[in-house]
Amino acid sequence: MLKRLLEYVGFEPGRFQARWISGSEGAKFTTTIKDMTEKIKSLGPNKKMRDDIV
Amino acid sequence: MDVIQQLREQAKKLLEEKKVDLVIGFGQGTELARTTPVFIDSPEGVSALTWGPFCANNLAKYLTDYKNAEGNVAVVVKGCDARSVIRLLDDNQISRDKVVVIGVPCPGQLEWQKVAAEVKPGASLKETADNGESFSVKTDAGDYSFNKKDYMLHRCLVCENPNPVIADITIGKELPVKTYEERFAEVSELEQKSTEDKSAYWDKQFSRCLRCYACRNVCSVCTCQICVFDQMLPMWVSKRTNLSENTMFHITRAFHVAGRCVDCGECDRVCPMDIPLRKLNQKIHKDLGDLFDSPTPGSKPGIPSALGEFSPGDPEEFM
Amino acid sequence: MPNPTALTPYPVTITKIVDETSDVKTFTVEFDDPDVMENFGNKPGQVCMLSIFGEGESTISITSAPTRGKFLEFTVKRVGRLTNVMHQMEVGQKFGVRGPYGNWFPYEIMKGKDLFFVGGGFALAPIRSLIDYALSDQYRSDYGKVEVLYGARSVDDLCFKSDLAERWPKLHNTAIYTTIDRPEEAWKGHVGFVPSYVEEVAPSPENKFAIIAGPPIMIKFTLPVFAKLGFKDDQIITTLEMRMKCCLGKCGRCNIGSKFVCVDGPVFSLAQLKGMPQEY
Amino acid sequence: MEARVVNKGQLPELLDKLAKDYDLIAPVQEETVVLFRKISGAKDVFLEYTNSDISPKGCFLPQNEKTFNYTYTGDSIEIKKPEGAQKTVLFGARPCDIKAITTLDPVFEGEKFGDEYYSGKRENTVIIGLSCTKVLSTCFCYAFEGGPCDGTGSDLLFTEIGDKYYVEVYTDKGKALADAYSQIFSKGGEQLAKDKEELAKKLAGEFVRKVDLTGVKELLDNNFELPYWNGDDQKKCLGCGTCTYVCPTCHCFDIFDYPTGDFTGARLRCWDSCMYPEYTLMAGGHNPRPTRKERVRNRFMHKLKYHLDRYNMVGCVGCGRCVRKCPVNIDITKIINDLKEVAQNA
């Protein structure tokens, strides 16, 4: 729900991810984190909700 | 006997028989095309009650103010407001035996600014009538007719159920329930747009937000004791308005009422800056349907709040 | 033209910290810029806005009399965010001060009169500035007998212990009455609530001003006692506490009726208070 | 009173020039709402409005404003203030909103302490008012010695007559600006003065909201605990901040620190509303105005009495925004008329 709402408001898909990983699934944990960081790196810095105080 | 007469009779009876100590209804406002909530605690006071195409407020909101007051309360509700009553009951915010619900099937509500622009200023209202495709409004300075397509609140054009789903007393006859082929047209149209367009659209809207919290304070299902936006210790959010805090406020507000918002459209109507908040809430309603095929909250008693329950059949996109 | 840069605080350095009780400390500070202190011109009863940058500001009354020297003393109870941070600060550190704000005790019309002070808990601080002012060498001769009746919940809650026990009793024509609410073995002095103690001491009303400061509950029960003793409303002076943000009479929140506590107060006589809406 | 004339056709040219030489703040339309924003040229201006949704008060008391940046390490304090206000022109404000700014002046410049931020903007801004041509059903500026063509507080006042603007010069600041653009501000226009009088008379007859203040102030002076305040208004009020945020004469603000790093940050000032519950909540937990009844009473007592007591000016200018924008139709004109009745029966 939150993922769809964020995309609806203009956040790039993939910037917010949710995964269910149990304690014993170490491998899945590492792959998920790797995928996420690559995805976010490709998206570049987040422009939305930037603080405007200088 | 027309609806207003019956409304006053029923209210008078309830008050005289001491069934309730207070009747919350609609009274004539200070503008021809406006009504204002009235709180009647004596049988003679029922003459203030009125009904017509200008009763847009959702009075169920006030029930939480009287939940600990001694004595019972009667409240006049339309189709959408009745859903709020059900949601408040399911959330245990109010106790059923302390509330008498007076349901009035609703032919739709007009946008008062649009009507006021047409009517001669200073005229006073005589009576109104629903003629199916339009409302006739008789005033002491001439009669007017307002077709529903142009003058009605948008939320009423796609009204899900004009008949209150909960009512101890029903006044007026049942109205046909319309069905619409594409209820979430606006939402889907915005969904198709690119991320940049969506972001630009909402940034433009939220940049106007004053953070006056009218949308939160008018919402009947926004019932937190101290809202996160009012907390001083710790001060999560300041009273400052800037795009990032406004965006956070609106996303948080919409998400906090996800699964409980009954789509009464009041937040959209009261916003002084005309921010299309219903378009935000409707997105969640659409997802509720797609993900959990749950109907609009409050449309039937006992619907579990989508985020409060889970069932094995729920989709698991995140596995 | 009134001072336009009133919202900008001046840096001060902490020179001394006294732990009055477990949650009340008195900070002695000096302005980094000496001539700010020179023409600061604070009078007893006035308040300042203390700035802890990153936490915000808070209104604290100046507890030191202007006659005590080129420094200011603030007594701060640990209540909110800002006061929590202050209580972790050490001597030598800095924070911001701006002021002095508000009106002051009417020490002009008090000349030639006896003064009977009543303090409760750490609220002795705002009136301590007037006590020290009246007991100061320059102005002692202007005032008659100076009596201080002070009460706190327990021995640990007693503030300004050194003033109460050593400094003030030795000065000319003073009487110090200290009490705690409930008996404790180490405590030899009077036991009982402030209102009943005032009834016991029974000060006579003629040629006397009563200056009261304390928690609302204490004031509520002490005022009738003074009325019974024959004190007229304009003989009773108190200082109020309100939520303040600008302290300059602009941000609008510290109003009681049309009076702003930060500009028209915080010192009011009971006569004035009775003329104002009971909304404080 | 000096007068000038500006042909309507030349207004865009004037606005483009002003936008180049000054920060030009003028009414613009965003979606269905009319606001005051800084604009880059005449194309953005929207003048077909009678009462903007938000007043131009933000031009002097912005909704958010930085008072200073600080660097604070506990051992050292450094304060850097933003640079002063730029040369600004506020164009297209209505007489009621400009009169509202004159009710703010004593608050920010009259008390014992001044306010450099407000005064800086006030001195550097030339106010060009625009007389009304229509009266809304929610307007009642006549009740507070104002009027649709009243020039109080304006440096220049434009009144649209036919295809020309009749310009009245009220202050030297206005005269200086008119002279600086003399090719657009042509001399003369005395004969248009009569047309303006007629317009003012015509509009004066169009007010439908009857407001009569007699006896209200005296009643409020002597009565604080009026049973009237226990009436419907405090029951239906939602406690939102709409009425105070759209009101041109509300001046309450909040000050707080916004850390942007471990040791750096900014002290900010932003609008606040007396209708919010924690507005007067003290650290110890005590709240002098705990329920909506006290807050609703305080708001209208401030408008109709407190502001008058302190600054000898009523705190309302009759713009009608709170009447239009209140979600539950709490109406200050109804309250004034009700209080008048209470005063008469008392």
Image (cartoon, grey):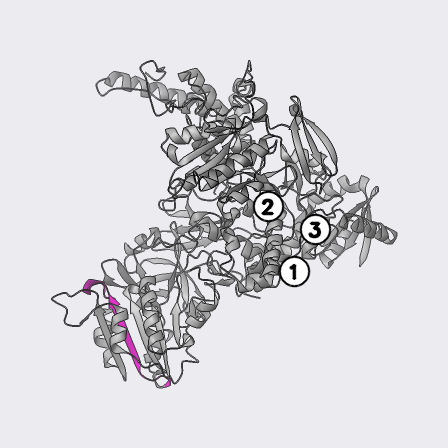
Type of residue at label 1? Thr
> Label 2: chain?
D
Which residues, given as a range, are shown in magenta?
C142-159
The residue where tag 3 is placed is: D95
Q: Position of residue D270 (x, y in %)?
A: 50, 48
Secondary structure category for the residue under label 3: helix
With C156 as the anchor, is D86 left or right in this view?
Answer: right
Q: Which amino acid does label 2 sit on?
A: Cys
User: Badge 1 sits on which subunit?
Assistant: D
Q: Which of marks 1 and 3 is in front?
A: 1
Residue C155 highlighted magenta (yes or no): yes
Check disc 3 and give the amino acid type.
Pro
Image quadrant in which the C terminus of chain B is located: top left
- Disc 2 element: helix
Secondary structure at numbered mark 1: loop
Q: Position of residue C82 (x, y in %)?
A: 35, 53
Q: Calculate the distance from the C-alpha at mark 1 to the C-alpha at mark 3.
A: 23 Å
Q: Position of residue C77 (x, y in %)?
A: 30, 59
The answer to which of D264 and B91 lies nearer the viewer is B91
Nearer the observer, disc 1 or disc 2? Answer: 1
Quadrant assignment for the N terminus of chain B: top right
Q: Give the residue pinned by disc 2.
A: D322
Does the magenta run of residues contain C133? no
* In this rendering, the label closer to the viewer, 3 or 2: 2
Residue at image coords 28%, 75%? C148
Earlier along the polypeptide chain: callout 1 or callout 3?
A: 3
Tell me which numbered mark, 1 or 2, is placed earlier along the sequence.
1
- Displayed quadrant of residue A29: top left
Q: Name the residue under label 1.
A: D214
Can the viewer see residue B284 in this picture?
A: yes
